[in-house]
Image (cartoon, grey):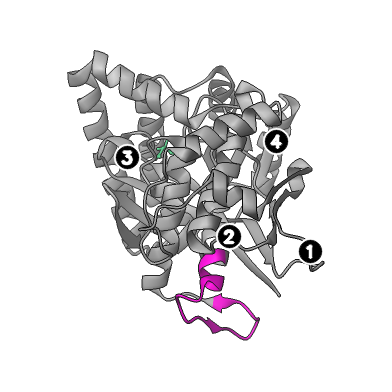
């Protein structure tokens, strides 16, 4: 039997980092997905291994189920319906994976991702042999929520097969999760994210699970009914960065400058709330849309300025900002910063000729330009 799940990546429209410290953030899903497929029972009878194939990275990991049970005992309280935080064993497994596969320091997130897979699988499915294949359309570690969509797609496929929820199939053969089951998928995915990122806010896994546009604050989700079809140019600077380290650096800056940083987080909160209000307010005609876009551009610029105050911008991000500013376009980083992806709002009245010119100029700097539809299903 084979079961597949897909989960989207995301962009953060406002409030990244500040959301870790209790401020509001607004995020939207994008139509680039991670796909997880699970096959069991295994093809041959005497195969007692659990395999994980990461197709885009050309990597395969396998564990004998017997050994896995010994090395990775799941707490007895850990059952599919009650997500629990990972055990300290997980961190020993990350260290062992790094050693065994000679994983360089910069790719430690990969070892953490593999461990998150083991944690989710053993907790939700148990110790059955199987083969899990993961592929993704998202550039890895670039701020588009690749790790969250990895955790959400795995969590969805495991929960669908756990037998603890009764799912209906739609006409296309996809299992349909209702909100309470999506909550469960989201909670497990968050535990995976915690293993990978240390102290995530939960916004990435939440938007990947529920899709569309969401407002997120201290673990609470509000769905946003956007009246606008936002067009964003996503520029991948291709500069690698580490979300965990960047999140920690902001916390350290807050410890050194508590008053100034608290003011920054409060401003971020106002920006996110204003942005959500603008998205939700009805736009009756083209003029109203243009006016709303101008307000959104200002909010994006202020958001970027505050991210600079937090110390998470990067020379490559500043190059994208300078380049797009020549065309009077507003740009902000999305996600953790330090490189990764950058968003530029493309106003509805902007001609295709200008968009092509901007893209060509950015690509000539070595960046990759992506276009993605915003706000699709989770
Ligand atoms: O995973 P990234 O790189 O898209 O960043 C996540 C957004 C942060 O606000 C920086 C961290 C978080 O957990 O909310």
Residue 279 spot, x, y in % from top left: 36, 56
* 119 to the left or right of 233: left
Q: Element under label 2?
A: loop
Mark 4–mark 3 distance (CA, rounded to whole Å): 27 Å
User: How busy is the neighbourhood of tag 3: few (under 14 within 10 Å), some, or many (20 plus)?
Assistant: many
Q: Earlier in the sequence, mark 3 or mark 1?
A: 3
Mark 4–mark 2 distance (CA, rounded to whole Å): 41 Å
Residue at 56% x, 52% y: name it: 69
- Number of the label disc, if any, that sits on residue 25: none
Q: Earlier in the sequence, mark 4 or mark 3?
A: 3
Q: Earlier in the sequence, mark 4 or mark 1?
A: 1
Magenta region, residue range:
158-175
- Number of the label disc, if any, that sits on residue 46: 1
Q: Is mark 3 within 8 Å of ligand 1?
A: yes
Mark 2–mark 1 distance (CA, rounded to whole Å): 15 Å
Quadrant hosting residue 175 = bottom right
Residue 129 spot, x, y in % from top left: 67, 61
For residue 117, say whether it is visible. no
Mark 3–mark 2 distance (CA, rounded to whole Å): 36 Å
- Number of the label disc, if any, that sits on residue 19: 3
Q: Nearer the viewer, mark 4 or mark 1?
A: 1
Q: Earlier in the sequence, mark 4 or mark 2?
A: 2
Camera-nearest residue between 197 and 353 = 197
Mark 4–mark 1 distance (CA, rounded to whole Å): 46 Å
């Amino acid at each position: 039997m084979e079961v597949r799940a897909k989960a989207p990546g995301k962009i953060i429209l406002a409030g990244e980092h500040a959301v870790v410290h209790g401020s509001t953030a607004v995020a939207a899903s994008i139509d680039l997905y991670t796909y997880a497929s699970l096959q069991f029972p295994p093809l041959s009878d005497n195969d007692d291994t659990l395999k994980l194939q990461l197709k885009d990275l050309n990597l395969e990991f396998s564990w004998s189920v017997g050994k896995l049970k010994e090395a990775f005992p799941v707490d007895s309280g850990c059952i599919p319906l009650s997500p629990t935080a990972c055990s300290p064993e997980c961190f020993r497994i990350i260290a062992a994976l790094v050693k065994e596969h000679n994983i360089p320091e910069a790719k430690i997130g990969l070892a953490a991702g593999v461990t998150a897979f083991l944690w989710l699988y053993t907790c939700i499915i148990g110790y059955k042999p199987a083969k899990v294949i993961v592929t993704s359309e998202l550039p890895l570690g670039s701020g588009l929520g690749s790790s969250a969509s990895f955790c959400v797609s795995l969590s969805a496929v495991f929960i669908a097969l756990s037998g603890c929820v009764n799912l209906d199939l739609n006409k296309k053969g996809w299992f349909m999760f209702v909100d309470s089951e999506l909550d469960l998928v989201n909670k497990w995915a968050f535990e995976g994210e915690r293993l990978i990122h240390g102290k995530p806010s939960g916004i990435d896994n939440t938007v990947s699970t529920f899709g569309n546009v969401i407002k997120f604050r201290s673990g609470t989700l509000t769905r946003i009914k956007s009246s606008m079809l936002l067009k964003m140019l996503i520029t991948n600077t291709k500069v690698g960065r580490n979300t965990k380290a960047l999140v920690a650096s902001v916390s350290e800056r807050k410890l050194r400058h508590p008053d100034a940083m608290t003011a920054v987080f409060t401003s971020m909160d106002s920006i996110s709330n204003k942005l959500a209000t603008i998205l939700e307010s009805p736009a009756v005609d083209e003029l109203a849309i243009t006016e709303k876009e101008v307000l959104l551009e200002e909010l994006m610029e202020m958001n970027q300025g505050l991210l600079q105050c937090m110390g998470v911008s990067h020379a490559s991000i500043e190059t994208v900002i300078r380049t797009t500013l020549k065309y009077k376009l507003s740009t902000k980083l999305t996600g953790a910063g330090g490189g990764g992806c950058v968003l530029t709002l493309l106003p509805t009245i902007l001609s295709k000729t200008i968009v092509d010119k901007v893209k060509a100029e950015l690509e000539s700097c070595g960046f990759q330009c992506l276009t993605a539809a915003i706000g699709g299903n989770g």
